[in-house]
């Protein structure tokens, strides 16, 4: 399987993609690489300070998916030409592009939504005002998949995670992944045992801290 990348920029929203990225690691042991225009500190919308582990010039054909989080204030990222140039360079590549919330604004400016049906968390007035947004292609639904592009509104972050995972062929998401609490559980169902070997490894590591 090809590698997976996440693109970050000023005021990006971790919450909208963390269900997906954490799920990839916890459930499927798949890491993602985080890309940005530079390795300077980037402030998320909730004031975390993040440094990407790779820059755009390190993104190559080894990657089969790029995930774009939404962003609280889209204008700094939108008018940073490094972001748009990077996205524009992806046009025509065999690559799954997954953008949530307001991030389709960046995809649109890079020309990646031409002849592509998409959804977005953009305010409607803004989507109509920006001449690079193909408003006629915009679908007012929680999640839309068209070809190699998946887009979703911010509140559909669970569905977004499942759609990306299914499209990548990792899992069919039929076992209730990311679906929240859907029933009442018994005590036995919520008693989790790691097994003798795993517990032994944990104890060895634990003891190494207190010796």
Image (spheres, rainbow, N blue to C red):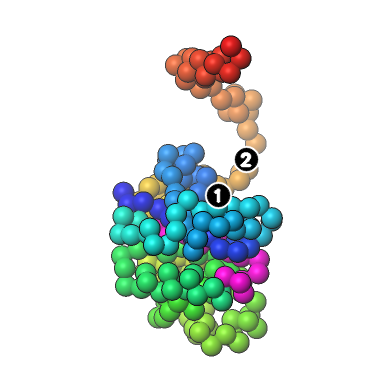
Q: Is residue 55 visible?
A: yes
Asked if 21 appears above or below 160 in the picture, the reply is above
Residue 20 on image: x %, y %: 51, 51
Asked which secondary structure carries label 1, the reply is helix
Span colored in magenta: 64-77
Q: Nearer the viewer, residue 66 or 82?
A: 82
Picture coordinates of residue 58 (x, y %)?
A: 38, 58
User: Does residue 16 appear left or right of residue 134 in this picture?
Assistant: right
* Numbered mark located on residue 183 in the image: 2
Find numbered disc 2 in the image and state the secondary structure of the residue it sits on.
Answer: loop
- Looking at the image, which residue sits at the far right? 47
Q: Observer-nearest residue: 11 or 82? A: 82
**Lower position in the chain sequence, tag 1 or tag 2:** 1
Query: Which quarter of the rendered picture does the C terminus lie within?
Result: top right
Expressed as whole percent of the image width and height from the top left, the position of residue 110 reads 45, 77
Spatial distance from mark 1 to mark 2, Cα to Cα? 20 Å
**Viewer can see residue 161:** no
Query: From the viewer's perspective, is residue 63 above or below residue 203?
Result: below
Q: Which residue is mark 1?
A: 19
Is 67 covered by the magenta stretch?
Answer: yes
């Amino acid at each position: 399987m090809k590698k997976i990348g996440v693109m970050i920029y000023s005021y990006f929203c971790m919450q909208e993609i963390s269900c997906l990225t954490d799920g990839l690691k916890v459930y499927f042991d798949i890491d993602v690489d985080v890309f940005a225009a530079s390795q300077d500190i980037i402030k998320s919308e909730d004031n975390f300070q993040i440094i990407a582990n790779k820059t755009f010039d390190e993104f190559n054909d080894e990657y089969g998916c790029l995930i774009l989080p939404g962003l609280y204030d889209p204008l700094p990222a939108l008018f940073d030409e490094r972001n748009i140039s990077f996205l524009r360079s992806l046009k025509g590549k065999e690559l799954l592009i997954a953008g949530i919330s307001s991030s389709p604004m960046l995809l649109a400016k890079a020309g990646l939504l031409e002849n592509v049906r998409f959804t977005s968390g953009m305010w409607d007035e803004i989507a109509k005002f920006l001449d690079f947004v193909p408003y006629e292609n915009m679908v007012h639904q929680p999640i839309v998949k068209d070809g190699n592009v998946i887009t979703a509104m911010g509140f559909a972050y669970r569905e977004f995670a499942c759609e990306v995972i299914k499209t990548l062929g990792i899992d069919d998401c039929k076992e209730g992944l990311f679906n929240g609490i859907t029933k009442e559980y018994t005590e036995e169902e919520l008693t989790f045992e790691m097994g003798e070997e795993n517990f032994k490894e944990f104890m060895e590591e634990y003891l190494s801290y207190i010796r």
